[in-house]
Amino acid sequence: MTPQPAPAAEPTVRLITLDPGHFHAGLVQKLMYPQVSPVVHVYAPEGPDLQEHLQRVQSFNTRAENPTHWGEKVYAGPDFLERMVKGKAGNVVVLAGNNLRKTEYIDRSIKAGFNVLADKPMAITPEGFALLRKDFDRAARDKLLLYDIMTERFEITTILQRELARMPELFGTLQKGSAEGPAVVMESVHHFFKEVAGKPLTRPAWFFDVRQQGEAVMDVGTHLVDLVQWECFSDQALDWKKDIKVLKAGRWPTKLTPAQFKRATGLEQYPDYLKKDVGVDGNLDVFQNGNVAYTLRGVYAKVTARWRFEAPPGAKDTHHSLLRGTRANLVINQGEAQHFQATLYVESKSGVPADEFEKTLRGAVSKLCATWPGVDVKPAGNLWEIVIPEKYSVTHEAHFAQVTERFLHFLAGEKMPDWEVPNMLAKYYVSTEAYRLSHRVEAAKQE
Protein backbone atom coordinates (compact mmCIF):
# COMPACT_ATOMS: atom_id res chain seq x y z
CA MET A 1 0.00 0.00 0.00
CA THR A 2 1.37 3.43 -0.99
CA PRO A 3 1.90 5.63 2.08
CA GLN A 4 -0.37 8.66 2.13
CA PRO A 5 0.94 12.05 3.12
CA ALA A 6 0.03 13.23 6.58
CA PRO A 7 -2.92 15.63 6.63
CA ALA A 8 -1.93 19.29 6.82
CA ALA A 9 -2.07 20.77 10.29
CA GLU A 10 -5.04 23.01 10.99
CA PRO A 11 -4.15 26.71 10.76
CA THR A 12 -3.37 28.09 14.21
CA VAL A 13 -3.94 31.76 13.35
CA ARG A 14 -7.37 33.22 12.62
CA LEU A 15 -7.35 36.84 11.54
CA ILE A 16 -9.86 39.53 12.40
CA THR A 17 -9.71 42.81 10.49
CA LEU A 18 -11.16 45.65 12.56
CA ASP A 19 -12.49 48.81 10.90
CA PRO A 20 -10.13 48.78 7.90
CA GLY A 21 -9.69 52.26 6.46
CA HIS A 22 -6.16 52.18 5.06
CA PHE A 23 -4.80 50.10 2.19
CA HIS A 24 -2.21 48.64 4.60
CA ALA A 25 -4.98 46.46 6.07
CA GLY A 26 -5.38 44.79 2.69
CA LEU A 27 -1.63 44.45 2.10
CA VAL A 28 -1.34 42.13 5.10
CA GLN A 29 -3.41 39.72 2.95
CA LYS A 30 -1.51 40.16 -0.30
CA LEU A 31 -0.10 36.66 0.22
CA MET A 32 -1.32 33.49 1.95
CA TYR A 33 0.41 32.02 5.00
CA PRO A 34 0.30 28.27 5.79
CA GLN A 35 -0.44 28.80 9.49
CA VAL A 36 -3.20 31.36 8.84
CA SER A 37 -6.80 30.35 8.16
CA PRO A 38 -8.09 31.60 4.78
CA VAL A 39 -11.28 32.72 6.52
CA VAL A 40 -10.96 36.28 7.82
CA HIS A 41 -13.64 37.95 9.92
CA VAL A 42 -14.12 41.65 9.24
CA TYR A 43 -15.90 43.99 11.66
CA ALA A 44 -16.52 47.54 10.53
CA PRO A 45 -19.12 50.27 10.08
CA GLU A 46 -20.90 50.43 6.73
CA GLY A 47 -19.24 52.76 4.25
CA PRO A 48 -16.69 53.25 1.49
CA ASP A 49 -13.69 52.34 3.68
CA LEU A 50 -15.04 48.82 4.14
CA GLN A 51 -15.90 48.44 0.46
CA GLU A 52 -12.44 49.62 -0.62
CA HIS A 53 -10.86 47.04 1.67
CA LEU A 54 -13.02 44.17 0.40
CA GLN A 55 -12.37 45.14 -3.21
CA ARG A 56 -8.62 45.18 -2.57
CA VAL A 57 -8.65 41.71 -1.03
CA GLN A 58 -10.83 40.48 -3.88
CA SER A 59 -8.30 41.85 -6.38
CA PHE A 60 -5.66 39.66 -4.73
CA ASN A 61 -8.00 36.67 -5.00
CA THR A 62 -8.66 37.23 -8.70
CA ARG A 63 -5.22 38.25 -9.99
CA ALA A 64 -3.76 36.07 -12.72
CA GLU A 65 -0.44 35.41 -11.02
CA ASN A 66 -0.29 33.68 -7.62
CA PRO A 67 -3.90 34.47 -6.63
CA THR A 68 -4.89 34.30 -2.97
CA HIS A 69 -8.01 32.54 -1.70
CA TRP A 70 -9.17 34.60 1.25
CA GLY A 71 -12.78 34.29 2.37
CA GLU A 72 -14.04 37.46 4.07
CA LYS A 73 -16.85 37.05 6.59
CA VAL A 74 -18.17 40.55 7.17
CA TYR A 75 -20.17 42.09 9.96
CA ALA A 76 -21.07 45.71 9.20
CA GLY A 77 -22.97 47.81 11.70
CA PRO A 78 -22.59 50.54 14.32
CA ASP A 79 -21.92 47.98 17.08
CA PHE A 80 -19.05 46.37 15.14
CA LEU A 81 -16.54 46.72 18.01
CA GLU A 82 -18.82 45.10 20.57
CA ARG A 83 -19.65 42.30 18.13
CA MET A 84 -15.97 41.63 17.54
CA VAL A 85 -15.17 41.50 21.25
CA LYS A 86 -18.06 39.14 21.99
CA GLY A 87 -17.70 36.99 18.87
CA LYS A 88 -14.17 35.69 19.53
CA ALA A 89 -14.01 34.69 15.86
CA GLY A 90 -10.21 34.81 15.72
CA ASN A 91 -7.06 35.24 17.76
CA VAL A 92 -5.26 38.07 15.94
CA VAL A 93 -6.73 41.52 15.32
CA VAL A 94 -5.29 43.44 12.37
CA LEU A 95 -5.61 47.23 12.65
CA ALA A 96 -4.99 49.70 9.84
CA GLY A 97 -7.29 52.64 9.33
CA ASN A 98 -8.57 55.80 10.96
CA ASN A 99 -6.16 56.52 13.80
CA LEU A 100 -8.56 58.53 15.97
CA ARG A 101 -9.70 55.31 17.70
CA LYS A 102 -6.59 53.20 17.03
CA THR A 103 -5.37 53.16 20.63
CA GLU A 104 -8.92 52.48 21.86
CA TYR A 105 -9.17 49.52 19.47
CA ILE A 106 -5.84 48.20 20.74
CA ASP A 107 -7.03 48.59 24.32
CA ARG A 108 -10.34 46.80 23.74
CA SER A 109 -8.64 44.01 21.78
CA ILE A 110 -5.96 43.35 24.39
CA LYS A 111 -8.51 43.43 27.23
CA ALA A 112 -10.60 40.87 25.30
CA GLY A 113 -7.63 38.51 24.96
CA PHE A 114 -6.67 39.07 21.31
CA ASN A 115 -3.17 39.38 19.90
CA VAL A 116 -2.78 42.58 17.87
CA LEU A 117 -0.86 43.39 14.68
CA ALA A 118 -1.27 47.15 14.27
CA ASP A 119 -0.25 49.43 11.47
CA LYS A 120 1.56 52.53 12.64
CA PRO A 121 0.81 54.67 14.52
CA MET A 122 -0.37 52.96 17.68
CA ALA A 123 -0.93 56.34 19.34
CA ILE A 124 -1.14 59.91 18.01
CA THR A 125 -1.47 61.97 21.22
CA PRO A 126 0.11 61.98 24.69
CA GLU A 127 -3.19 60.63 26.09
CA GLY A 128 -3.02 57.77 23.61
CA PHE A 129 0.54 57.02 24.68
CA ALA A 130 -0.54 56.79 28.33
CA LEU A 131 -3.20 54.22 27.38
CA LEU A 132 -0.77 52.32 25.16
CA ARG A 133 1.65 51.86 28.06
CA LYS A 134 -1.11 50.15 30.04
CA ASP A 135 -1.90 47.91 27.07
CA PHE A 136 1.70 46.75 26.77
CA ASP A 137 1.69 45.93 30.50
CA ARG A 138 -1.54 43.94 30.14
CA ALA A 139 -0.28 42.15 27.02
CA ALA A 140 2.85 41.03 28.88
CA ARG A 141 0.80 39.89 31.86
CA ASP A 142 -1.68 37.95 29.70
CA LYS A 143 1.00 36.59 27.33
CA LEU A 144 -0.43 38.37 24.30
CA LEU A 145 1.52 39.75 21.37
CA LEU A 146 1.14 43.46 20.60
CA TYR A 147 3.26 44.50 17.63
CA ASP A 148 3.37 47.31 15.11
CA ILE A 149 4.16 47.14 11.39
CA MET A 150 7.61 48.61 10.76
CA THR A 151 8.13 47.95 7.06
CA GLU A 152 11.16 50.22 6.62
CA ARG A 153 13.40 47.82 8.53
CA PHE A 154 13.16 45.55 5.48
CA GLU A 155 14.43 48.14 2.97
CA ILE A 156 17.86 46.93 1.74
CA THR A 157 19.61 50.32 1.84
CA THR A 158 18.49 50.77 5.44
CA ILE A 159 19.64 47.26 6.35
CA LEU A 160 23.09 47.83 4.86
CA GLN A 161 23.40 51.29 6.43
CA ARG A 162 22.74 49.65 9.78
CA GLU A 163 25.28 46.89 9.10
CA LEU A 164 28.02 49.31 8.06
CA ALA A 165 27.36 51.41 11.18
CA ARG A 166 28.17 48.30 13.20
CA MET A 167 31.68 48.06 11.69
CA PRO A 168 33.90 50.31 13.83
CA GLU A 169 36.90 49.87 11.53
CA LEU A 170 34.90 51.71 8.83
CA PHE A 171 32.33 53.86 10.64
CA GLY A 172 34.16 54.47 13.88
CA THR A 173 31.63 55.31 16.56
CA LEU A 174 28.43 57.30 16.28
CA GLN A 175 29.09 60.97 16.96
CA LYS A 176 27.10 62.86 19.57
CA GLY A 177 26.41 65.82 17.28
CA SER A 178 24.74 69.02 18.43
CA ALA A 179 21.43 70.84 18.22
CA GLU A 180 22.75 72.73 15.15
CA GLY A 181 24.36 69.66 13.57
CA PRO A 182 22.56 66.47 14.61
CA ALA A 183 24.50 63.22 14.35
CA VAL A 184 21.44 61.47 12.96
CA VAL A 185 19.08 62.98 10.40
CA MET A 186 16.05 61.17 8.98
CA GLU A 187 13.67 62.74 6.47
CA SER A 188 10.86 61.44 4.27
CA VAL A 189 8.53 62.90 1.68
CA HIS A 190 5.15 61.27 0.98
CA HIS A 191 2.40 62.08 -1.49
CA PHE A 192 -1.36 62.26 -1.08
CA PHE A 193 -2.08 61.13 -4.63
CA LYS A 194 -0.35 57.90 -5.70
CA GLU A 195 -0.87 54.47 -7.18
CA VAL A 196 -1.03 51.25 -5.14
CA ALA A 197 -0.96 47.81 -6.81
CA GLY A 198 -1.09 49.61 -10.16
CA LYS A 199 -4.28 51.58 -9.45
CA PRO A 200 -4.88 55.18 -8.31
CA LEU A 201 -5.36 55.21 -4.55
CA THR A 202 -8.60 56.77 -3.35
CA ARG A 203 -8.03 58.41 0.02
CA PRO A 204 -10.91 58.65 2.51
CA ALA A 205 -11.75 62.26 3.36
CA TRP A 206 -10.81 61.70 7.00
CA PHE A 207 -7.23 61.01 5.89
CA PHE A 208 -6.90 64.79 5.46
CA ASP A 209 -8.11 65.47 9.01
CA VAL A 210 -5.03 65.24 11.20
CA ARG A 211 -7.24 64.80 14.25
CA GLN A 212 -8.21 61.42 12.76
CA GLN A 213 -5.13 60.44 10.75
CA GLY A 214 -2.49 61.90 13.03
CA GLU A 215 0.05 64.53 12.09
CA ALA A 216 3.23 63.84 10.14
CA VAL A 217 5.65 62.97 12.94
CA MET A 218 2.99 60.99 14.80
CA ASP A 219 2.07 59.04 11.65
CA VAL A 220 4.70 58.34 8.96
CA GLY A 221 7.34 59.89 11.22
CA THR A 222 7.14 56.86 13.50
CA HIS A 223 9.03 54.92 10.81
CA LEU A 224 11.86 57.43 11.00
CA VAL A 225 11.97 57.49 14.79
CA ASP A 226 12.02 53.69 14.69
CA LEU A 227 14.97 53.66 12.28
CA VAL A 228 16.98 56.05 14.47
CA GLN A 229 16.69 53.53 17.30
CA TRP A 230 17.04 50.40 15.16
CA GLU A 231 20.14 51.59 13.30
CA CYS A 232 21.98 53.52 15.99
CA PHE A 233 21.25 51.37 19.05
CA SER A 234 21.02 47.92 17.46
CA ASP A 235 19.56 45.26 19.73
CA GLN A 236 19.57 47.60 22.74
CA ALA A 237 16.55 48.21 24.94
CA LEU A 238 15.85 51.91 25.42
CA ASP A 239 14.12 53.49 28.41
CA TRP A 240 11.75 56.26 27.31
CA LYS A 241 11.88 57.85 30.76
CA LYS A 242 15.67 58.02 31.03
CA ASP A 243 17.25 57.83 27.58
CA ILE A 244 15.26 60.43 25.64
CA LYS A 245 14.98 64.21 25.80
CA VAL A 246 12.64 65.79 23.26
CA LEU A 247 13.97 69.29 22.65
CA LYS A 248 11.88 70.93 19.95
CA ALA A 249 9.08 70.16 17.50
CA GLY A 250 7.24 72.00 14.74
CA ARG A 251 4.32 71.57 12.33
CA TRP A 252 3.14 73.28 9.14
CA PRO A 253 0.47 72.63 6.51
CA THR A 254 0.30 71.37 2.95
CA LYS A 255 -2.34 73.35 1.06
CA LEU A 256 -4.71 71.34 -1.14
CA THR A 257 -6.96 73.00 -3.72
CA PRO A 258 -10.56 71.78 -4.05
CA ALA A 259 -9.58 70.15 -7.37
CA GLN A 260 -6.73 68.24 -5.71
CA PHE A 261 -8.98 67.14 -2.87
CA LYS A 262 -11.52 65.84 -5.41
CA ARG A 263 -8.82 64.00 -7.34
CA ALA A 264 -7.55 62.29 -4.18
CA THR A 265 -10.94 61.45 -2.64
CA GLY A 266 -13.47 61.57 -5.45
CA LEU A 267 -15.56 64.02 -3.38
CA GLU A 268 -16.99 67.27 -4.74
CA GLN A 269 -17.00 69.07 -1.36
CA TYR A 270 -15.13 69.11 1.92
CA PRO A 271 -17.03 67.30 4.68
CA ASP A 272 -18.14 69.41 7.63
CA TYR A 273 -15.34 68.22 9.93
CA LEU A 274 -12.72 69.64 7.51
CA LYS A 275 -14.31 73.06 7.05
CA LYS A 276 -12.49 74.48 10.06
CA ASP A 277 -9.24 73.82 8.14
CA VAL A 278 -10.30 75.64 4.97
CA GLY A 279 -8.71 79.05 4.44
CA VAL A 280 -10.25 82.16 2.90
CA ASP A 281 -8.72 81.09 -0.42
CA GLY A 282 -10.82 77.91 -0.36
CA ASN A 283 -7.77 75.67 0.02
CA LEU A 284 -7.50 73.01 2.69
CA ASP A 285 -4.70 73.29 5.26
CA VAL A 286 -3.51 69.77 6.05
CA PHE A 287 -0.97 69.84 8.89
CA GLN A 288 0.95 66.87 7.57
CA ASN A 289 4.44 68.32 7.81
CA GLY A 290 6.47 68.28 10.97
CA ASN A 291 9.81 67.74 12.64
CA VAL A 292 11.18 66.80 16.02
CA ALA A 293 14.66 67.29 17.49
CA TYR A 294 15.70 65.15 20.42
CA THR A 295 18.58 63.35 22.08
CA LEU A 296 18.81 59.61 22.52
CA ARG A 297 21.43 58.61 25.09
CA GLY A 298 23.09 61.93 24.41
CA VAL A 299 23.08 61.59 20.61
CA TYR A 300 21.36 64.47 18.80
CA ALA A 301 18.78 63.36 16.22
CA LYS A 302 16.33 65.18 14.00
CA VAL A 303 13.36 63.64 12.17
CA THR A 304 11.32 65.45 9.50
CA ALA A 305 8.26 64.14 7.65
CA ARG A 306 6.61 66.00 4.76
CA TRP A 307 3.57 65.47 2.55
CA ARG A 308 3.07 66.90 -0.93
CA PHE A 309 0.10 66.36 -3.19
CA GLU A 310 1.73 64.41 -6.00
CA ALA A 311 5.23 63.34 -6.94
CA PRO A 312 6.84 64.81 -10.08
CA PRO A 313 6.85 62.51 -13.15
CA GLY A 314 9.12 59.54 -12.52
CA ALA A 315 9.43 60.31 -8.83
CA LYS A 316 7.86 58.70 -5.77
CA ASP A 317 7.97 58.83 -1.97
CA THR A 318 11.54 59.54 -0.89
CA HIS A 319 13.76 58.79 2.08
CA HIS A 320 16.94 60.49 3.33
CA SER A 321 19.09 59.20 6.16
CA LEU A 322 22.40 60.43 7.57
CA LEU A 323 24.49 58.77 10.28
CA ARG A 324 27.64 60.65 11.27
CA GLY A 325 30.51 58.45 12.47
CA THR A 326 33.96 59.39 13.71
CA ARG A 327 35.61 57.77 10.65
CA ALA A 328 32.84 57.92 8.03
CA ASN A 329 29.33 59.18 7.32
CA LEU A 330 26.65 56.85 5.96
CA VAL A 331 24.08 58.55 3.72
CA ILE A 332 20.94 57.39 1.92
CA ASN A 333 19.64 59.73 -0.79
CA GLN A 334 16.67 59.22 -3.10
CA GLY A 335 16.45 62.31 -5.26
CA GLU A 336 16.61 63.10 -8.93
CA ALA A 337 20.36 62.39 -9.03
CA GLN A 338 19.58 58.84 -7.90
CA HIS A 339 16.69 58.51 -10.39
CA PHE A 340 14.48 58.42 -7.28
CA GLN A 341 15.94 55.07 -6.21
CA ALA A 342 17.19 54.85 -2.62
CA THR A 343 20.99 54.81 -2.84
CA LEU A 344 23.49 54.26 -0.02
CA TYR A 345 26.75 56.21 0.07
CA VAL A 346 29.81 56.20 2.33
CA GLU A 347 31.72 59.43 2.93
CA SER A 348 35.23 59.38 4.36
CA LYS A 349 35.98 61.87 7.13
CA SER A 350 38.90 64.21 6.74
CA GLY A 351 42.07 62.89 8.30
CA VAL A 352 41.60 59.31 7.07
CA PRO A 353 44.12 58.57 4.26
CA ALA A 354 42.29 57.84 0.99
CA ASP A 355 44.07 54.58 0.18
CA GLU A 356 43.61 53.28 3.72
CA PHE A 357 39.91 54.21 3.67
CA GLU A 358 39.29 52.48 0.34
CA LYS A 359 40.95 49.32 1.59
CA THR A 360 38.85 49.37 4.77
CA LEU A 361 35.67 50.06 2.81
CA ARG A 362 36.26 47.21 0.39
CA GLY A 363 36.91 44.93 3.34
CA ALA A 364 33.61 46.01 4.91
CA VAL A 365 31.73 45.39 1.66
CA SER A 366 33.34 41.95 1.43
CA LYS A 367 31.84 41.18 4.85
CA LEU A 368 28.41 42.26 3.58
CA CYS A 369 28.78 39.85 0.66
CA ALA A 370 28.78 36.91 3.05
CA THR A 371 25.05 37.58 3.57
CA TRP A 372 24.23 39.61 0.44
CA PRO A 373 26.35 38.19 -2.41
CA GLY A 374 26.99 40.62 -5.23
CA VAL A 375 27.06 43.83 -3.16
CA ASP A 376 29.87 46.05 -4.44
CA VAL A 377 31.24 49.57 -4.14
CA LYS A 378 32.22 52.24 -6.66
CA PRO A 379 33.44 55.85 -6.55
CA ALA A 380 30.72 58.52 -6.80
CA GLY A 381 32.40 61.92 -6.84
CA ASN A 382 33.75 62.55 -3.37
CA LEU A 383 31.63 59.68 -2.01
CA TRP A 384 31.54 55.93 -2.44
CA GLU A 385 28.32 54.30 -3.62
CA ILE A 386 27.29 50.90 -2.31
CA VAL A 387 26.16 48.98 -5.40
CA ILE A 388 23.21 46.75 -4.50
CA PRO A 389 21.94 44.07 -6.93
CA GLU A 390 18.33 44.56 -8.03
CA LYS A 391 17.32 41.21 -6.53
CA TYR A 392 17.58 42.70 -3.03
CA SER A 393 15.19 45.57 -3.76
CA VAL A 394 11.74 44.65 -2.44
CA THR A 395 8.71 46.88 -2.96
CA HIS A 396 7.05 48.69 -0.08
CA GLU A 397 3.94 46.56 -0.60
CA ALA A 398 5.97 43.34 -0.29
CA HIS A 399 7.41 44.49 3.04
CA PHE A 400 4.01 43.91 4.66
CA ALA A 401 4.28 40.17 4.08
CA GLN A 402 7.78 40.22 5.59
CA VAL A 403 6.55 41.97 8.74
CA THR A 404 3.56 39.62 8.97
CA GLU A 405 5.83 36.58 8.67
CA ARG A 406 7.97 37.92 11.52
CA PHE A 407 4.88 38.50 13.65
CA LEU A 408 3.68 34.93 12.94
CA HIS A 409 7.03 33.50 14.02
CA PHE A 410 6.72 35.32 17.34
CA LEU A 411 3.14 34.10 17.67
CA ALA A 412 4.30 30.52 17.09
CA GLY A 413 6.72 30.70 20.00
CA GLU A 414 9.89 32.28 18.67
CA LYS A 415 11.10 34.67 21.36
CA MET A 416 10.61 38.30 20.47
CA PRO A 417 13.81 40.31 21.16
CA ASP A 418 13.80 41.87 24.60
CA TRP A 419 14.32 45.34 23.10
CA GLU A 420 11.20 45.36 20.90
CA VAL A 421 8.58 46.43 23.46
CA PRO A 422 10.69 49.05 25.28
CA ASN A 423 11.69 50.50 21.93
CA MET A 424 8.10 50.67 20.72
CA LEU A 425 7.36 52.66 23.86
CA ALA A 426 10.40 54.87 23.26
CA LYS A 427 9.26 55.51 19.70
CA TYR A 428 5.74 56.54 20.63
CA TYR A 429 7.02 58.69 23.46
CA VAL A 430 9.12 60.69 20.96
CA SER A 431 6.28 61.08 18.45
CA THR A 432 3.57 62.00 20.95
CA GLU A 433 5.87 64.34 22.87
CA ALA A 434 6.50 66.02 19.50
CA TYR A 435 2.74 66.49 19.27
CA ARG A 436 2.63 68.10 22.72
CA LEU A 437 5.54 70.47 22.05
CA SER A 438 4.47 71.53 18.55
CA HIS A 439 0.94 72.29 19.72
CA ARG A 440 2.28 74.24 22.69
CA VAL A 441 4.32 76.36 20.26
CA GLU A 442 1.22 76.93 18.10
CA ALA A 443 -0.83 77.95 21.15
CA ALA A 444 1.85 80.42 22.21
CA LYS A 445 1.82 82.03 18.75
CA GLN A 446 -1.91 82.62 19.00
CA GLU A 447 -1.80 84.29 22.43
Image (spheres, rainbow, N blue to C red):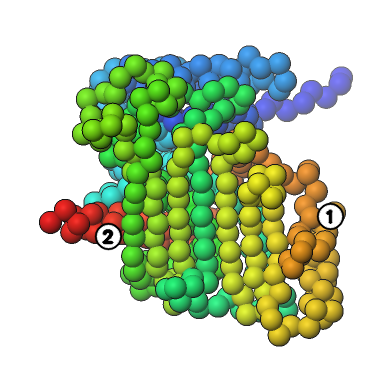
Residue depicted at 38% across the width and 52% down the height: 290
Give the number of the disc on residue 79.
none
Question: Is residue 350 left or right of 400 when viewed as pictured?
Answer: right
Residue depicted at 77% across the width and 26% down the height: 5
**Mark 1 vs 2, N-terminal side:** 1
Outermost residue toward the bottom in this view: 351
Q: In the rendered structure, which amino acid carries the disc numbered 1? A: Pro
Dot 2 falls on a residue whose secondary structure is: helix
The quarter of the picture where residue 241 lies is bottom left
Dot 1 falls on a residue whose secondary structure is: loop
Residue 16 placement (x, y as % from top left):
43, 29
Q: Nearer the viewer, residue 432 or 72?
A: 432
Q: Residues within 10 Å of mark 2 (few under 14, many from 20)?
A: some
Vertical side of 181 occupied by 205: above or below: above
Cα distance between the residues tagged 1 and 2: 46 Å
Q: Is residue 207 visible?
A: no
Q: Residues within 10 Å of mark 1 (few under 14, many from 20)?
A: some
Give the number of the disc on residue 437.
2
Outermost residue toward the left in this view: 447
Residue of label 1? 373
**Rendered-image quadrant of the C terminus:** bottom left
Q: Nearer the viewer, residue 224 or 11?
A: 224
- Between label 1 and label 2, give the one nearer the viewer: 2
Residue 350 placement (x, y as % from top left):
69, 81
Residue 359 placement (x, y as % from top left):
84, 75
Residue depicted at 52% across the width and 58% down the height: 186
Q: In the rendered structure, which amino acid carries the disc numbered 2? A: Leu
Q: Nearer the viewer, residue 87 or 205?
A: 205
Residue depicted at 56% across the width and 42% down the height: 317
